[in-house]
Image: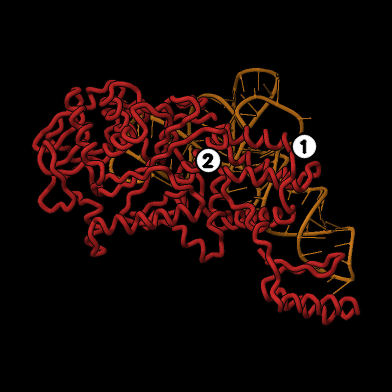
Amino acid sequence: MRLNNTLTRRVEEVVPVDDRKIGMYSCGPTVYRYVHIGNLRTFLLSDLLRRALEFEGYEVTQVMNITDVGHMTDEASDSGRDKMDLAVADEGLSPKEIAQKYTQAFLDDTEAIGIKRVHVYPKATEHIPEMIELTERLIENGHAYEVDGTVYYDVRSFPEYGKLSGNTLDKLRAGHRQELEVDSNKRHPEDFALWKKAGPNRLMRWDSPWGEGFPGWHIECSAMSMKYLGERFDIHTGGVDLIFPHHEDEIAQSEGGVRHEVISAWVHGGFLRLKEQKMAKSSGNIIRIGDLAALGIDPLSFRYFTFETRYRKEMDFSEDALRAADTTVKRLRQRMAEWGGPAEGLGSEAKAFDGRFREAVADDLDMPQALVILNELASSRNVPDPEKYSLVSSWDQVLGLDVERDARAGWQPSDEVAALVGERDAARANKDFATADRVRDRLQELGLEVMDTPEGTRVRPRI
RNA sequence: GGCGGCGUAGCCAAGUGGCUAAGGCGGAGGUCUGCAAAACCUCUACUCAGCGGUUCGAAUCCGCUCGCCGCCUCCA
């Protein structure tokens, strides 16, 4: 497996820390609102990567945080409100109920698009002691300082700050965007909070060595990733927007805490744009996966849709393109049903296709290429149908499109349909085409595709 | 202001120095059919935002121009 590593800006071979095992951490959802299909594109990337690694025979342990502590609407000043608190106010539920509601919604949405459950979903609120412990360690190591109940990370104590995003301290200074309100307790404007003192109205608060407060945004990922995957692991995934500051700060915290490199490869997914813009929950420019059902689109077709563009490239969402993907997926399932079932073994042509498919997937998840190979196989005249079936069904370990659905279903006509088919065959035998056409219209009204074969009328559900 | 990305056919989108610029959807024609449908076959960018340059050779490298997007504040 070769992956584009944001840290080195190169495509590199994945070399696991531990032989054939891979530890992988994926930034998860904040559970005070629904996720949209833009978020899901990124979660799909982590699922695809996990499946691709397993396809290559790695034993993957995947961890995804559930962020159930709200972050501030305005991180730069104390005037911002906590997002979880806002949700609580809006919905009249407790923080715990809000978190439960949206965690379940998140799991339902990911399941609908074929995302496998990860191995551990640690919740931020259940790891406050670990975060406090790491914060203490950072203070001991000279990377952090406390002022009035808030603990800050001293970015100048970490010379490698900026290595992920390119936002090194001199660049940050040079490009200071505007007059952001600077917290006067910070030694330097670029310092960020590890632990924050709780204001009087704040709902979610915990005791700490520095008084009552709550964790900073980035510390949960450092604390929880190292708890479940160890202080040295392989891959971290997330959306491009997290590169800075979230992942940059996470590196400073983790490496400052353990004094060595923690994560080998950082993999970031590009945005899904809607109407030429980033899909943002705050602006309401969003579509949820549940909205697709109303369009008659299989949620798994969204999966296929995201495979048409390389994961790290920005892509545009359009209903036309999604419908095209939906048609392709449904046809593929139908062809699988036509191909019948798997073969005993594979011929050399089929093996060559398999090698090409695997190579594409291993090449930094080149799914656009993998889909080309899939299509070429489907229309190849040199590969027997059962071998096509075998290959596509094994590739579905990566694709996750439930390609065998139609083949498995073994659709059976109802008595009514069977009677109509008999009627039509009789009419055609008598060359009574007026009746035959009338019956065909009726079958089509029932949502069926009507095909004449040497064996007579054949029907199947229309896609 | 700093950091980064994109602009390829009606739509989505591969390709990042060299045979005729992938593939999907859509569209057109054909074979088959009583007519259809399905399936299969053929066609659908003399050209890669524009203008210069490097090169024997560029969609691919360099420069400029135009248009668009993201991060730098919560954010997939």
User: Residue A314: percent from the left, percent from the top?
Assistant: 49, 43
Image quarter hosting the N terminus of chain A: top right
Dot 2: what SS? helix
User: Residue A260: percent from the left, percent from the top?
Assistant: 32, 21
Q: Which chain is red?
A: A
Report the chain holding disc 2: A
User: What colouring does the structure picture have?
Assistant: by chain
- Colour of chain B in the rendered structure image: orange
Is A381 rendered above or below residue B63?
below
Q: Nearer the viewer, residue A67 or A179?
A: A67
Q: Nearer the viewer, residue B39 or A119?
A: A119
Q: Compute the Cα span from label 1 to label 2.
A: 25 Å
Q: Which residue is mark 2?
A: A51
Identify which amino acid the numbered label 1 is placed on: Gly
Report the chain holding disc 1: A
Dot 1: what SS? loop
Q: Is A237 left, or right, of A316 in this rendering?
A: left
